[in-house]
Image: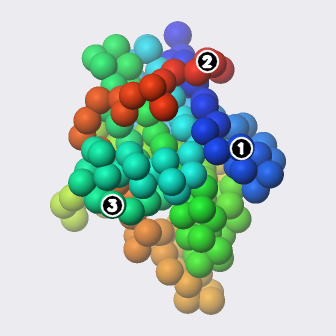
């Protein structure tokens, strides 16, 4: 049985900024689960938030009083966890990197789910393995390599980074919603 992928839109501005945001996020999560290996049957929750909520979560769980593009929260043993994206930060990064918002969202969902599955980029060898998986998954989704410098010389995905909160689900704000 495929893991459940719940999705919660905490910031309604996502729907105006990126029609079909839910479909893009779920598709990226499914592709990651299919390629990256065995995941708990309980599933995961994708949360489309804004910078205000992301800043609050980042402050509470990582001690950093600023927003960030993506946070991953490990779940209970039967659950994979939550991946939370911040709209304004993700939009700004996509513009700065010369990418579509949809492609950048897909990449960050892939990145966040890989963190939940135990992948990391703290060491060079781990980072290479994780980036290789990201490239493979994104290629299956028809998305260009986010780590290749663009012709315009814009910042690569590596500079943007993502953050993993080594905590349990952040609470009611990101509780499981509907399952897909």
**Residue 67 in the image: above or below residue 48:** below
- Picture quadrant where residue 118 is located: top left
The picture places residue 109, in percent across and down from the top left corner, at 52, 46
Q: Which residue is mark 2?
A: 179
Q: Nearer the viewer, residue 67 or 163?
A: 67
Cβ–Cβ below 8 Å for labels 1 and 2? no
Earlier-in-chain disc, 3 versus 1: 1
Q: Which residue: 50% across, 80% down?
A: 155
Residue neighbourhood size for the residue with mark 2, other residues' Cα within 10 Å, grouped as few (<14), some (14–19), many (≥20): few
Q: Which residue is mark 1?
A: 12
Q: Nearer the viewer, mark 3 or mark 2?
A: 3
User: Seen from this angle, which residue lies furthest bottom?
Assistant: 152
Q: Which residue: 62% across, 87% down?
A: 151
Q: Is residue 132 visible?
A: no
User: Seen from this angle, which residue lies furthest left?
Assistant: 123
Earlier-in-chain disc, 1 versus 2: 1
The picture places residue 87, in percent across and down from the top left corner, at 60, 56
């Amino acid at each position: 049985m495929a893991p459940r992928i719940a999705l919660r839109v905490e910031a309604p501005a996502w729907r105006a900024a990126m029609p079909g945001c839910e479909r893009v996020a779920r598709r990226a999560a499914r592709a990651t689960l299919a390629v990256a290996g065995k995941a708990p049957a309980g599933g995961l929750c994708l949360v489309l938030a804004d910078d205000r909520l992301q800043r609050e979560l980042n402050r509470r769980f990582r001690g950093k009083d600023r927003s960030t593009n993506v946070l991953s929260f490990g779940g209970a043993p039967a659950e994979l966890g939550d991946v939370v994206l911040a709209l304004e930060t993700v939009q700004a990064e996509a513009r700065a990197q010369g990418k579509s918002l949809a492609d950048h969202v897909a990449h960050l969902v892939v990145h966040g789910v890989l963190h939940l599955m135990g992948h990391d980029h703290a060491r060079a060898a781990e980072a290479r393995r994780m980036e290789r998986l990201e490239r493979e998954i994104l290629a299956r989704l028809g998305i260009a390599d986010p780590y290749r410098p663009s012709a315009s010389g814009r910042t690569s995905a590596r500079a943007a980074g993502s953050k993993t909160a080594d905590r349990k689900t952040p609470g009611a704000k990101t509780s499981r919603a509907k399952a897909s």
